[in-house]
Image (tube, rainbow, N blue to C red):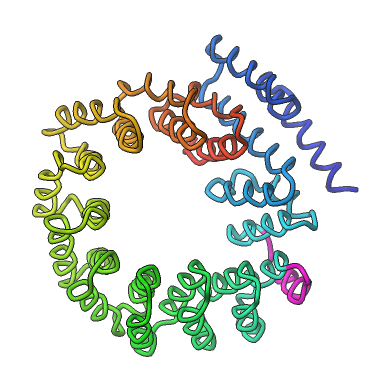
Amino acid sequence: MLRPLLVAAALLTASCGAPNVVQVAMQGDLATLKQEIQASQAEGELDRGTVRRLAWAVAGRELRSSRGEAAVRRIRQVSPCASNLVTVLRDRAGRSDDAGAEASLLLLETRRIDGTPLVARYGDASSGAWRAVAARAATAPSYAQLRRKLIADHDERVRRAALQAALSTPHVDDLAAVLEATRLDPDPLSRSLAARAAGAIGGERVALALRDYWARADESTRMMIVEGWAMPATLDAGGRESLVWAAETEPGLPALAAADALIRSGGSSADVGAAVLFRALQEGTQQERRLAIRLAPVSDPALRAEMKRALDDSDPLVSVMALARLVDDPAQRPTIIQKLRKLARRKGGVALQARAALAAAGDTGVVDQLLQQLEQGSSHRRRLAAESLLRLGLYDRAATALADDDPAVRTAVACSVLSHSP
């Protein structure tokens, strides 16, 4: 009984002296909150600090009130702003449902709770969600046997958590288990975590094992193998040579991922990565060119020149991506802004990308389109509009989304507000 009473007292304290709009977010219904936000906007009362308090109230209420799988989704959504919601997450972790386990996982990830008692309590739990909590907490060498057992658990939530534990605290004793998971786990995220965990353990054996797996791997798994080679403990134990081989001789997106890893690692092999991205920009498939634009460092003169040639590409998405990457160039900014504004007036994904790029560039000329998108778009579009308004510093206008009909939009935008530095 004590925890609910403490939480209720905390909420009462938080609401005391709070603006009416914040109090409504804590205690009122959605229709009233919409009206209160509109009234506050009209009166000019939604400054940045008030919107942050409003976002905290909205996110906290969503976490407390959601049930079942929806509650799990809401908790996962607040991962980027978890440090601002520790009190609510601790309360949610005190419940015995799957969402309570998800909140416990998030608190473990952010190191807000001690995991040691959780291993003994939930290591053999019948609930996969709570076994996952034990798996994530099992980072100490003394838990090696349990960790390896849970890496092979039948529940993918448990396997993911155990592999995250292995990744966060690499132990050589886990190597065989994580390599096996890289090769055989049916879950793509688990394979990715396993490849990175193997790379974090490191050594020539890892580099060679991942090279052996490459021949039988599909494209997504090859992207994960690249991540393993690029881990610091493996990079200089054969990983760099494997990345050069993949970038220069293999086709498709994994080669570009390898090229990006080489550039980020620095040294002489960075030139190999730059050459591969340059080639993809010139003659790659549509998908390869889009990825190459996203990855290419604008500081490289040759790659920058090639991106300039993509400004008027026949593929409008390639064009808008190139415009977004080069908009900070003072000499080209006025021309690029005009091109982005033209694209922003179109329909579909290209317009969304252009509006987001304009907002990121600080161009307030896109505000009217964002406000219209915020009112009339799909859930995805409304969320993107609100986040773009936040980038422009228009917290009062973005606050509309904190009373959105879709709880996923409300939660995502609330977390975006809280994630922005105060």
Q: Is residue 261 above or below residue 73?
A: below
Q: Magenta includes 124?
A: yes
- Of residues 63 and 217, the one nearer the viewer is 217
Q: Quarter of the image holding residue 236?
A: bottom left
x and y percent of residue 106 in the render?
62, 57
Q: Residue at x 18, y 32 (%)?
A: 336
- Could you tell me residue 254's position as x and y percent? 29, 68
Identify which residue is drawn at 76% across, 76% down: 124
In x, y percent, where is residue 388? 40, 32
Residue 378 vs 257, above or below: the answer is above
Q: Is residue 135 left or right of residue 399?
A: right
Identify the magenta region: 113-127
Whether residue 280 is in magenta: the answer is: no
Q: Is residue 145 left or right of residue 248?
A: right
Residue in front for this viewpoint, 414 or 186 = 186
Across and down, in percent, residue 95 comes to 79, 54
Instruction: Give the residue at x 39% y 70%.
Output: 224
